[in-house]
Amino acid sequence: MDRNEKKRTRDKIGQHLDVSGTRLTDHEASFLSALIDDYDETYRGKSETHRSSHDGWSSDGKFTRTEEWTDTFTDDIGIRQDYSYHDDDGQSGQSSTEIRDARGVLNWFRDRR
């Protein structure tokens, strides 16, 4: 990818994702460009949920924690990550984050390959 093509590709990516301070290899820039092109038909609205359960210890003794992670491709290009947990002793919590930067999206895909 020559310098001008990479700049055009980076500008295209920057219209949808935060690329400030992000260095992209040619492969990463091409991947994100293809993701943007295919986003509507391949990714938008799709969701994936993972659940796990494990035992832990607290000052009150042993407890079982059930955790759930849901990754959803948002309407705008990005990924929302929802996390929740519930312990059998009544504790629970949840959080949500959105990935809207180029490096974050690349890392998300890298971690799932």
Image: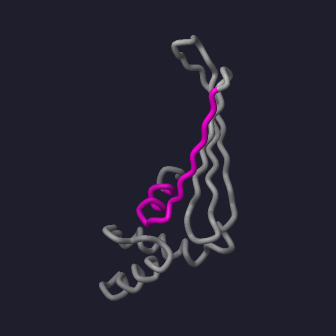
Image quarter in which the N terminus is found = bottom left
Residue at the (46%, 77%) spot, across then down: 13
Picture coordinates of residue 109, whole percent (x, y): 51, 57
Q: Is residue 23 left or right of residue 72?
A: left
Query: For the magenta stretch, what is the residue range?
Result: 91-109
Q: Is residue 26 left or right of residue 105?
A: left
Q: Residue 44's image quarter?
A: bottom right
Give the vertical position of 8 relative to 14 (above or below): below
Q: Is residue 26 left or right of residue 80?
A: left
Q: Among all residues in the image, which is located at the extreme bottom?
A: 4
Q: In terms of depth relative to the viewer, which is nearer, 73 or 30?
A: 73
Q: Residue 39's image quarter?
A: bottom right
Residue 105 magenta-highlighted = yes
Picture coordinates of residue 66, whole percent (x, y): 65, 30
Picture coordinates of residue 55, whole percent (x, y): 59, 20
Picture coordinates of residue 45, whole percent (x, y): 69, 64
Residue at the (35%, 84%) spot, across then down: 7
Q: In terms of depth relative to the viewer, which is nearer, 102 or 95?
A: 95
Residue 108 magenta-highlighted = yes
Q: Residue 37's image quarter?
A: bottom right
Give the vertical position of 81 relative to 103 (above or below): above
